[in-house]
Amino acid sequence: MKLRREEVLHLARLVRLGLSEEEIEKFSVQLSNILENFEILKQVDTTNLPPMTQSIALQNVFREDEPSPSYHPEEVLANAPQREGNYFKIRAVLE
């Protein structure tokens, strides 16, 4: 399906894009190619396929949450600009 210049301009107005003549021609070709690919996909027989939201099975990729030793407060606060005891000292965020 070949998009006409007017259709590309209409789409550009909908998304509030200002396009040059060169961009209009470029997007006309690119959008037409996308629509042609959808026409090909519409020909695929999906009558016996169950609906799905994922094409591959999902799996958890996170590691187990295991406790580990923490850093000593002196190491953590070594480069702190200001500190108060074992805490970072910062300006008040809320009055």
Image: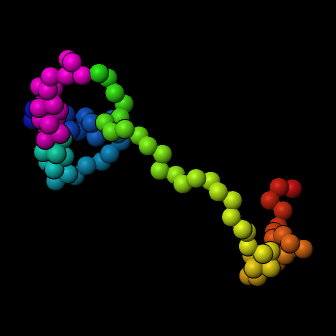
Q: Horizontal placement of 75 versus 49: left or right?
A: right
State the residue at coordinates (52%, 52%). Answer: 62
Q: Quadrant of the C terminus?
A: bottom right
Vertical comparison of 94 with 11: above or below: below
Q: Choose between 36 and 19: the one closer to the eye.
A: 36
Task: Say if residue 28 shows up in the picture.
Answer: no
Depth check, front residue: 22 or 73: 73
Q: Horizontally, is 90 left or right of 42 in the view?
A: right
Q: How far across and how far down the image is residue 89, in percent?
A: 83, 71
Q: Position of residue 65 (x, y in %)?
A: 62, 53
At a point 25% along the width and 49% down the height, the residue shown is: 19
Query: Does residue 94 appear in the picture of this structure?
Result: yes
**Residues in magenta, as a range:** 32-49
| Number of numbered tags placed on the structure image | 0
Measuring from the top left, give residue 58's x and y in whole percent: 41, 40
Q: Quadrant of residue 94?
A: bottom right
Q: Is residue 48 magenta?
A: yes
Q: Residue furthest right?
A: 85
Q: Is residue 92 above or below residue 56?
A: below
Quarter of the image for the N terminus: give it: top left
| Residue plotted at (84% across, 70% down) | 87
- Judge whether residue 45 is colored magenta: yes
Q: Furthest residue to the top?
A: 47
Residue in view at x 24 percent, y 22 percent: 49
| Horizontal and vertical percent position of residue 12 | 28, 40
